[in-house]
Image (cartoon, coloured by chain):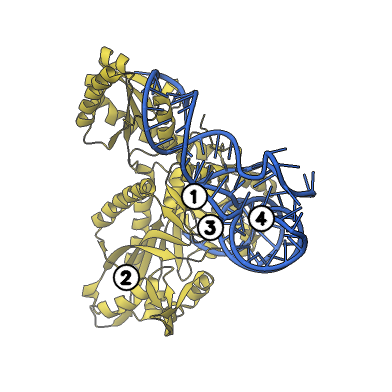
Chain colours: A yellow, B blue
Amino acid sequence: MAKDLTSRAEDYSRWYNEVVQQAELADYAPVRGCMVIRPYGFALWENVKAALDRRFKATGHVNAYFPLFIPMDFMEREAEHVEGFSPELAVVTHGGGKELEEPLAVRPTSETVIGHMYAKWIQSYRDLPVLINQWANVVRWEMRPRLFLRTTEFLWQEGHTAHATREEAEREVMRMLDVYAEFAETEAAVPVIKGRKSASEKFAGAGASYTIEAMMGDGRALQSGTSHDLGQNFARAFDITFQDADGELQHCWTTSWGISTRFVGAVVMVHGDDQGLILPPKLAPTQVVIVPIWRDDDERAEVMGVVSGLKEELRTIRVEVDDREQHTPGFKFNEWELRGVPLRIEVGPRDVKNRQAVLARRDVPGREGKSAVALADVPGAVPRMLDEIQESLYRRAVAFREERTARPTSREELDKAVARGFAWAWWCGSAECEGRVKEDTSATIRCIPFEQPGGEGECIVCGGPAEEQAVFARAY
RNA sequence: CGGGGCGUGGCCCAGUCUGGCUCAGGGCGCCGCGUUCGGGACGCGGAGGUCCCCGGUUCAAAUCCGGGCGCCCCGACCA
């Protein structure tokens, strides 16, 4: 049993806070709403980052960096955008010991500055498309912060592209949503539902927003990545124009898309159990931990000989050897389980004698997850087992989501369904019906999934004609 | 912003109601030595605190009173 860790059943959000801190992913900073991402948490984020960055490059994007400070009036140029962000804006009013003539917004997102620069850089259809991504921090003054899920400052990636045609921009929006979904499922083993945001949930200033929604371990939804079709809204506000092949001056079609450190929270909540984190092998900072066991110096020498051999043979894998003297093996087992390392290798005197090692899978607790493997077979078994763990985490998450997903046909069923998970239901498309559900149950429309059952139905709220189903859920 | 909780060695907390004496304590962690080591070891010794801050009451305040600050949790906005 994990000592000092609240069980998920007892209090899920407490479990989350404790596991994040005890596993040393993050800690509270002295400023309210801010957190320190500790080395272990940052290593996890770096792996997320590397996996995404690889995919961005493969789809033709390049990285750049735009500044943290944005002239205040930029924020005001796109009407819906200002309205969306003004409550959570941090504003710098002083600099160099003087009050600034024009206040500077600390970016909550970079559409505006980037729009300004794109207007300078883009003149001809030959300059298009512009496919830029930036890795940055942003600040949003949130009312209710939570580690990783909602912090005042967070890290993310924001892609900003400009295109000559609406169709091309739309393709980009979908392409990047697909990249996110593929990343989430294959790297993080987090199954997601792709869909469109309802009008009330979409990004301020976008024509349409698309999302990948994942189910957390308590049945609540987490928006894990978004891709926005900005239409010509920002192009108009910032005068991003180009001359087409016919010599006509036109506004560009722009997109933006992002995934943030919030995604780390998703990984924690999708896979973790009452012992602590369970990290998907592909993203785990440490994929394999080797715990040597000995009683005296002779055994120690013997065991460590085998251990260093193993480490060498596993050099293509992220392996750590825990040879700390001051802790017993049992303590180490628990600690590495708390930290979510997917695979543990135990090597003790018995194993040395039998020319074997004991492999313990993090996703299968206790004795059941342990197996003895001949030393010669370990280098082959480890990658195979990591793949199996990756696979099984994904399958388990899908099964959990399906088990917690309902297809209600009445309001009573809907209300009951959102208390424990996702509810797919016909929706007429009106904000009134959406709002009614939110008021009664605090559940919102997470998305209108691309994968629809087909046909038509009656709106679960008003009974009016409905062409689409929406996924309702309580969300983070 | 509304509701609730909390501030006491690094961490978790007792003590506060009923002021003083056993009121500066416990557990964990940390340092040293020894024995241990296959699922969170044990013994002995040790270091470490302006009791959140300011003011007041009192012979006497961690404790009572006033004010302030901070943090966490639960609700309305958001990646």
Q: Nearer the viewer, residue A263 or A227?
A: A263
- Give the residue number, with chain letter if any, for mark 1: A452
Of the image marks 3 and 1, the number of the one nearer the N terminus: 3
Q: Is residue A304 left or right of residue B46?
A: left
Label whose residue precedes the other's in the sequence (1 or 2): 2
Badge 3 and badge 1 in a common chain: yes
Question: Is A430 displayed left or right of A309 in the figure?
Answer: right
Residue for badge 2:
A66
Q: Mark 3, mark 1: which one is toward the viewer? A: 3
Binning the other alpha carbons within 10 Å of mark 2 as few (below 14), some (14 to 19) or many (20 upward) gives some
Residue A283 position within the rendered picture, expressed as x and y whole percent measured from the top left: 34, 43
Q: Does label 2 or label 3 sit earlier along the sequence? A: 2
**SS for tag 1?**
loop
Mark 4 vs mark 3: which is more N-terminal?
A: 3
Look at the numbered discs 2 and 4 and tell me whether their residues touch, using CB distance below 8 Å: no
Confirm whether residue A27 shows in the render.
yes
Disc 4 designates what residue?
A461
| Image position of A290 with respect to B37: above or below | below
- Name the amino acid, label 3: Pro
Task: Residue type at mark 1: give it.
Answer: Gln
Distance from disc 4 to disc 3, alpha carbons, whole Å, reads 32 Å
Is the C-beta separation of discs 4 and 3 under 8 Å?
Answer: no
Q: Which residue is mark 3?
A: A145
Of the residues under marks 1 and 4, which one precedes in the sequence?
Answer: 1
Q: Specify the subunit that label 4 lies on.
A: A
Q: Say which quarter of the image contains residue A342.
A: top left
